[in-house]
Image: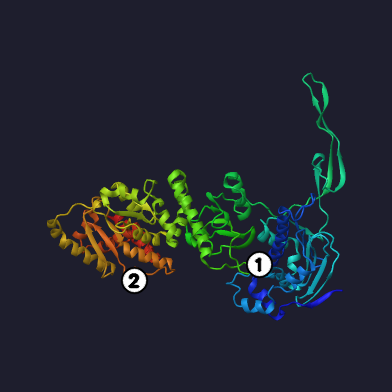
Amino acid sequence: MAKKGSLTINSENIFPIIKKWLYSDHDIFYREIVSNGCDAITKLKKLDGMGEWQKPEDLKFKIEVITDPNEKSITFIDNGIGMTMEEVDEYINQIAFSGAQDFMEKYKDKANEEQIIGHFGLGFYSAFMVAEKVTIDTLSYKDGSQAVHWESDGGTEFEMEAGDKAEQGTTIKLYLNEESLEFCNEYRAKEVLEKYCSFMPVEIYLTNAAAEDQFETIEKDELTENDTVIETILEEAKTEEIEKENGEKEVVEVSPASEKYKIAKRPAPINDTNPLWNKHPNECTEEEYKDFYRKVFHDYKEPLFWIHLNMDYPFNLKGILYFPKLNISYDSLEGTIKLYNSQVFIADNIKEVIPEFLMLLKGVIDCPDLPLNVSRSALQNDGFVKKISDYITKKVADKLTGMFKTDRENYEKYWDDINPFIKFGCLKDEKFAEKINDSLLFKNLSDKYLTIAECLEENKEKHENNVFYITDEKEQGQYINMFKEAGLDAVYMNQNIDNPFVGYLEQKNENVKFLCINSDLSDIFKEEVTEEDKEAMKADVDALTELFRKVLGKENLDVKVEKLKNENMSSMITISEESRRMAEMMKMYSMPGMDNSMFGTTETLVLNYNNKLVQYVLGHKDGAHTNTICEQLYDLAGLSHGSLTPERMTKFIARSNELMMIMAEA
């Protein structure tokens, strides 16, 4: 006699919950049903290990997924622990042990906060997101158990009766609704299974019931008792006629006669039941790490290096984090950290577990102790999760500092690729910053990699606690040459992240000042000028300032007149460190093209008193071509500092042609 009834939870409440806020991705039912099958097999293995059940020698644990596009169905078969009728009634019909009312009251508003997975058999009900009818056929492992058949249309009414399943385990069949037919397509099924189930601990086999039979050919000695032989293939020996040294011809056997078998294609699991992260680091080869990286991330550029996480106490966590070759513009970087719970995929880049800066890496983390919510799509934000996050941060910092101390040559080799990640980490994570601070490197003008302490040591005689840096090698070429000629050093800081990072460095390293190479002219480039010289130059300085402001139409232009050692340098532009940082900040916040003066910053035009062209201007303030020369000097300074606006560049080219014509006619 079949038992009929309504599910002990109001369908008007439970199914909107399942469909709308428990599972945002409808493909998730694959994960839920397959992982339930894995759990059923794991429980049976434990009973075997405890001596409460004995596994038959010929039993191979597996999960089968069969798609049938003709029938519009998907079947999931496991040979795990199975269920009795009482267990089906308890786990399936009641949905929750404590009944509908208690479930709804406790959890209807808290699914994103409370830990309810494991307390309720809701994973199975994800099937009703895609199915209009679901059947279960199950047989418990217990001796003398009666098979059970259960079915439900739409999840509101059910029927349960004695079944005819002969092997222990559970078969769940989904008859898909019209909106979900994509999931019985073999290729879509494979895609979803690879997404969620690639590393589940039980072998998973995918079959298309509507596909034509497939075959493969094997050598005779490769045949096993599990193979189905379709045809025996006899291949005759191959011979070839050759000519011997004496001119006689001889027929020789090139390959002997052989016997092969055409067999039904051997099923292959779609998953790896023992992923690399489960192995001890000492057991893994470099090639295995690289193969795993390629397979999981479909990235055929080799990773730089990796960290194998392996922790048993105070929580269980395993994983591998890879440092990929990073793009230097850090704001467009995106890595992938895949989070697993006992080899079941949960999600990518879960921020509660993975610190933000580690999102630039690629890797897998498996933590069976994660406090998951019912949909496994979010975590409780508690102290335990914070400890996991802190542990991962510490291991990454330990790997980097260890490499710096014991393998600096390789650390320097990787630095150009990994420094955006490290700098981002310093800005985002204080604990990481503290650990890594002494391992920060800076590439100097000689392409040497130096720590801050080493930078200061190299420059201490010439500019004390100042560290000069380059933001654009092309635009600052003139200043770089001046530094090299003067025996001064500077370091490259030419990435987007370096502007905020400079501020961080000054905050962390007291008394150290970072100055852009074109922020001001070091005294080392200037001749010593006495007070008497300054007094003698004052009238000329005032005259040059007034002339350039008038010609350029910039009443507030800051003009400096210096005696530079290099007489060939006529003019330069400097921008104060504060102004440059402000301009970079505006650029970072998508405010390009803003004039410096709009936020109180100004440029300084530096004229070389020792330069003949500057002296010519002084001696010919009212000359026919003086205004043109002043404009040209200003634009030349602008070019050496960076680029000109399109309008200024157009005028500069026209003026250059004009000056060359004057020279030609002179």
Q: Which residue is mark 2?
A: 599
**Label for residue 118?**
1
The residue depicted at 67 percent of the width and 66 percent of the height is: 28
Nearest the eye: 658 or 235: 235
Nearest the eye: 356 or 580: 356
The residue depicted at 26 percent of the width and 59 percent of the height is: 606
- x and y percentages locating residue 384 in the rendered image: 53, 63
- x and y percentages locating residue 523 in the rendered image: 23, 53
Left or right of 4: which side holds 614? left
Regarding residue 657, the answer to whether it shows in the image is no
Marks counted in the figure total: 2
The residue depicted at 45 percent of the width and 44 percent of the height is: 406
Q: Residue 140 lies in what quarter of the image?
A: bottom right
- x and y percentages locating residue 642 in the rendered image: 37, 59
- x and y percentages locating residue 315 in the rendered image: 56, 58
Left or right of 648: which side holds 197? right
